[in-house]
Image (cartoon, rainbow, N blue to C red):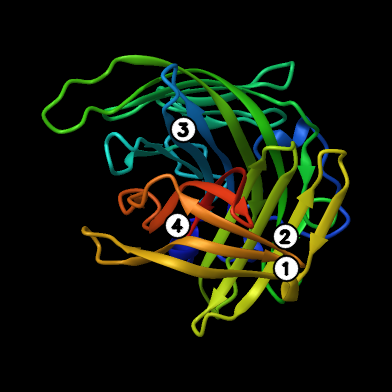
Amino acid sequence: MLCTGFVATGSAFAAASEFAAVTPGRPIVLPQDSGAHAAFRTEWWYATGWLTTPDNQPLGFQITFFRSATGHDRADPSAFAPSQLIIAHAALSDPALGHLAHDQRMARQGFGLAYAKPDNTDVKLDAWKIVRAGDGHYDVKVDANGFALHLALTPKQAPLVQGEGGYSRKGPRPEQASYYYSEPQLRVSGSVVRPAAAGSKSTGKTAVTGTAWLDHEWSSTLLDTDAVGWDWLGANLTDGSALMAFKVRSRDGHAVWAHAALRNRDGQVTTFGRDQVDFTPVRTWRSPRTNTSYPVSMMVKTGALTWRLDPLMDDQELDSRQSTGAVYWEGAARVSRDGVDVGRAYLEL
């Protein structure tokens, strides 16, 4: 995932020189690096996945926690000092509803109500939380407006360290980078409360199983000034492989930067550079709320491989203007190659 929202709002924060820098050669160390890195400007824990109900109905889900350092004077002793902000987004894609159900929260860190702890994933915002247990599984609890997610995400594979040992370039200059690792092919169990369609009652709590993907990134720089948008893909493939790809777009649609990583079921990782990755729209959908046109079906090229993405449903637009300030499309998508279904993904536009 690229840092949705903070590309737009980053100018409101202090200069990047006040924050820790991302540099190559610093290894990702787990589980310590699964926790918060308060010296960096921004950080996010981003879990997405596909769920299946007992009657074999598909659902998509997303939960993201952001930590943002504001650059406030660190010498300020006040417990109310707004030195760190915690922001959270949650969404459920339910074809029975026909549009994305989503909610958002934001608060300054403090008083045990909102925090992102170091050394192990433990992030909380009011009653929303994601916590990494000692055995490596994640407990996710979100009671949102009209829906709920109570999920356990259990690793079946080792983490996929992105970029060069976790140093992930996002632009042509070396400082335009994040520290980045993923945990694909997470096994999901738990329950959801599905949103009620117009004129009907909530279906109540529904047991679910599924597969998820978790991204964790932290950085102190914004995207290149030529960048106007991005596409990102995280795909769990049915043979046990995992695919991540992104493209940072300029105004004319060319790639400011692009990268992809494909790990096969045996653990071998193939990476693809800027000239080997592309996202080509196949079909667009126009939002009735914002009038924005989104390329909801895409062909994604990674070297000699071409992947087709088709959405679980078209209307997966997320309006986060009350928190991070962005409106974007982020949704569950099917992955196919040559007309054959090969996996499930989340696509962010």
Considering the numbered disc 4 on the image, is that residue within a helix, a strand or a loop? loop
Q: Which residue is mark 4?
A: 5
Q: CA distance from mark 3 to mark 2?
A: 42 Å
Q: Is residue 41 visible?
A: no
Disc 3, SS: loop
Where is residue 33 shown, x and y percent of the image?
75, 37
> Badges 2 and 1: C-beta atoms under 8 Å apart?
no
Tell me the SS state at disc 1.
loop
Q: Residue furthest left?
A: 199
Q: Quadrant of residue 303?
A: bottom right
Work out how far the residue at label 1 is from the one at label 3, CA to CA, in angstroms: 33 Å
Work out whether residue 228 or residue 154 is closer to the camera in this orientation and state it. 154
Give the CA distance from mark 4 to mark 1.
Answer: 20 Å
The residues tagged by marks 2 and 4 sit, at their Cα atoms, a distance apart of 22 Å
> Residue beneath label 1, please?
175
* Mark closer to the chain start, 2 or 4: 4
Side of 121 relative to 194 (left or right): right
Q: Earlier in the sequence, mark 3 or mark 2?
A: 3
